[in-house]
Image (cartoon, grey):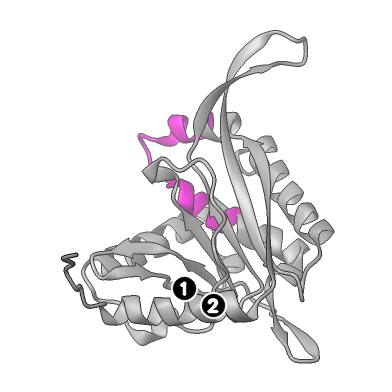
Amino acid sequence: MVAKRVALTMVERTMARRMLQSAREIPQFSATVEVNFDKVAAWRCRISRERRVSVTALFVWLTARALLKHPRLNAQFDDDAILVHSNVNMAVAIETSEGLVAPVIRKAETLSLSETAEVLKDLTDRATRKRLSLGDFKEATFTISNLGMFGLTRFAPIINPPQAAILAVGAIRRVMQADEEGKPVVSQIVDLTVTADHRVLSGVEVALFLRTLRDSVETAEFVK
């Protein structure tokens, strides 16, 4: 058998080491909720001429606020204790030519939606141009991974240690559903999946967090 040996980049070696650590040391479970995206989609369409807010930026912003209500997801296991972080330092998974990186949006809970979008755009641009510094990766407390733009409807990511949880955002898809009167309507749906550390979180805690996040999207109160 003939095979080509491809050397890993430094980024890929680091990621491989951390994911092996995660799989070996953390008892992980995943939970998924289906979310109606119609109101947010309509809002994004209305504002598209004025500004562009990516799906990832929106979920970073909403998730940071949901974590304030469910702080155990913004935590880590520490031997005989759980460290609950006071700030949400949100790592965002970004694919680059050298592999997957996850730079951090610090104190994401303090940023407006516009500020979140600007910071994320800056990190993405610098990641693409290989201009991120070591400081851009430090002190992450939670991670978001959005593979929806690649057509994946649902996936269960691996936790980035020492964090206690990670959120996966799937593709926005159109499905036929029944409205309140039982009539068929086409809705836009997105699946949100949390993978959590069972030493820190129970299934109920993750379910309550996902319900808060789902309600934030489906009511879209932030657009008023």
Give amino acid for label 1: Val
Label 2 close to label 1 by CB (< 8 Å) = yes
Q: Quadrant of the N terminus?
A: bottom left
Q: Is residue 220 visible?
A: no
Q: Is residue 16 above or below residue 177?
A: below
Q: Which residues are magenta?
A: 42-62
Question: Which residue occupies 43% across, 56% down?
Answer: 117
Residue 212 at what x, y percent from top left?
74, 50
The 10 Å Cα crowd at callout 1, few under 14, some 14 to 19, many 20 or more, is many
Q: Quadrant of the C terminus?
A: top right
Give amino acid for label 2: Ala
Residue 107 at what x, y percent from top left?
57, 73
Give the structural element (helix, strand or loop) at label 2. loop
Pointer 2 residue: 140
In the visual, does 165 lie left or right of 209? left
Task: State yes or no: residue 54 in magenta.
Answer: yes
Q: Is residue 58 visible?
A: yes
Q: Is residue 94 above or below residue 57?
A: below
Residue 220 at what x, y percent from top left?
64, 38
Give the structural element (helix, strand or loop) at label 1. strand
